[in-house]
Image: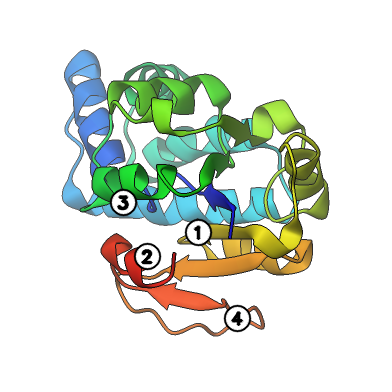
Amino acid sequence: MKIVLLDIDDTIFDFYESAKATILKCCKDFNIEFTDKMIAHYMEQNEFLWGQFEKKVITREDIFRKRFPELFKEYGIDIDGIEFEEAFQKYFKTEYKLIEGAVEIIKYLSEKYDLYIVSNSLIDTQRKRLTAAGIIEYFKDLFVSDIIGYQKPTKEFFNCCFEQIPGFDNKNTIIIGDSLSSDIKGGCNAGIKTCWFNPNRKINKTEYKADYEIASLNELRNIL
């Protein structure tokens, strides 16, 4: 193996904790209370919308246009959801909570392989979060859907990434990520090795089977 592609949210960063911390900052600005129930509801809605984006049912802009406005409408909160989303995006750029062992395993992998980020997000947001976490220097490049023009798991996304990787060889490339529908499906369709990061030990009910499955990032030392 020579090339390692790494997802960001829920692979390097804990998205739930990062998003929760960001939402609580926004709540102070808007002088509202965001209950644990609302945060759980937001996470479910956010996951659903990103899934729709992966399937090309909606655009990325639809996600940002819908998630907070629809949530506030359901809970009867008289707040402009778009303004709240804008505040969320501002704070989220520097908000991160690292997955246990992430920094150590990234340093370990960077000494042996060429590391690249592959993310369905916004380049400015992810670049700033990786910089704030002090780990951006370990990656050769960041491949993010808003710049690529396609999203995981499409073949177009991966083909665009591969075209920009010097000496790319699919036989020597692996993707590591938490999402079966995005990372593992995309990796399988792209003809590269796949590693499913599954800390909650979920049951894979999809047709896409990863070459490797790990419950902690440290287990990558046994694979790579």
Instruction: Find out whether the residues at labels 4 and 1 contact each other: C-beta distance under 8 Å.
Output: no
Marks 4 and 1 sit apart, C-alpha to C-alpha, by: 13 Å
Q: Which residue corresponds to mark 4?
A: 209
Q: CA distance from mark 4 to mark 3?
A: 23 Å
Instruction: Read off the residue under disc 3.
Output: 105
At label 2, which amino acid type do we have?
Leu
- Does residue 48 appear left or right of residue 162 in this picture? left
The percent coordinates of residue 107 (x first, y second) are 32, 42
Give the labeled residue for mark 1: 176
Which of disc 2 and disc 3 is earlier in sequence? 3
Pointer 2: what residue?
Answer: 220
Q: Residue 198 appears in which quarter of the rendering? A: bottom left
- How many residues crowd mark 1 within 10 Å: few (<14), some (14–19), many (20+)? many
Disc 1 vs disc 2: which is toward the camera? 2
Asked whether the residues under the numbered discs 3 and 2 touch, taking CB atoms below 8 Å apart as contact, a structural biologist would say yes
Q: Which one is in front in this view, the residue at disc 1 or the one at disc 3?
A: 3
Q: Is residue 140 above or below residue 224?
A: above
Q: Work out whether 129 lies above or below 173.
A: above
The amino acid beneath tag 3 is: Ile
- Label 3 sits on a secondary structure element that is helix
Residue type at mark 4 is: Lys
Tell me the CA gap for discs 3 and 2: 8 Å
Question: Which tag, 1 or 2, sits closer to the chain's start?
Answer: 1
Q: Secondary structure at mark 4?
A: loop
Q: Amino acid at mark 1?
A: Ile
- Mark count: 4
Q: Nearer the viewer, residue 16 or 119?
A: 119
